[in-house]
């Protein structure tokens, strides 16, 4: 259910960058952890990013930069339903 919700709020489109400033135009096929699970990223909707296969595999287990996080959040303001938090990324709390 959460996976479908994540794809729905992203309009079934990849949320990662294409050519640095623009959003990737491919269809989302993967639910990705923005902060990788293997590096301590939470399994939560805040850490969920809809991704195409190419963007997801090229990101791998790397931790995205603060600039990448800000770009996704800025774009999310345009396509997330009103009142939905646009923040991305969450670490597991110890």
Image (spheres, grey):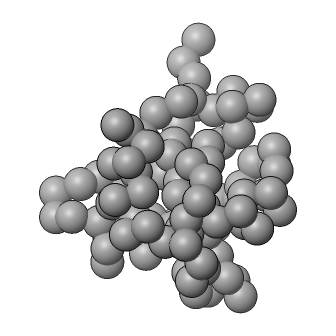
- Residue 54: horizontal and vertical position, in percent? 76, 68
Q: In the rendered image, which quarter contains the N terminus?
A: top left
Which residue is drawn at the image coordinates 43% and 75% (left, top)?
Answer: 75
Which residue is drawn at the image coordinates 53% and 54% (left, top)?
Answer: 49
- Residue 52: horizontal and vertical position, in percent? 64, 66
- Residue 5: horizontal and vertical position, in percent? 33, 48
Quadrant in the picture for residue 73? bottom left
Q: Residue furthest top?
A: 94
Which residue is drawn at the image coordinates 21% and 64% (left, top)?
Answer: 81
Q: How many marks?
A: 0
Q: Does residue 87 show up?
A: no
- The correct choice, above or below, for 33 with respect to 92 in the image is below
Q: Residue furthest left?
A: 83
- The correct choice, above or below, for 61 with respect to 27 in the image is above
Say left or right for 34 vs 3. Answer: right
Q: In the rendered image, which quarter contains the C terminus?
A: top right
- Residue 38: horizontal and vertical position, in percent? 77, 29
Say left or right for 86 vs 52. Answer: left
Which residue is drawn at the image coordinates 76% and 31% (left, top)?
Answer: 39
Q: Does residue 60 show up?
A: yes
Quadrant in the picture for residue 78? bottom left
């Amino acid at each position: 259910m959460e996976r479908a919700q994540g794809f729905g709020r992203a309009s079934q489109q990849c949320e990662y960058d294409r050519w640095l400033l623009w959003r990737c135009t491919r269809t989302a096929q993967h639910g990705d952890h923005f902060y990788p699970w293997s590096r301590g990223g939470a399994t939560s909707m805040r850490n969920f990013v809809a991704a195409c296969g190419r963007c997801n595999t090229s990101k791998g287990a790397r931790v995205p930069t603060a600039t990448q996080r800000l770009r996704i959040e800025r774009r999310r303001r345009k396509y997330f339903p009103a009142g939905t938090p646009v923040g991305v990324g969450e670490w597991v709390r110890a």
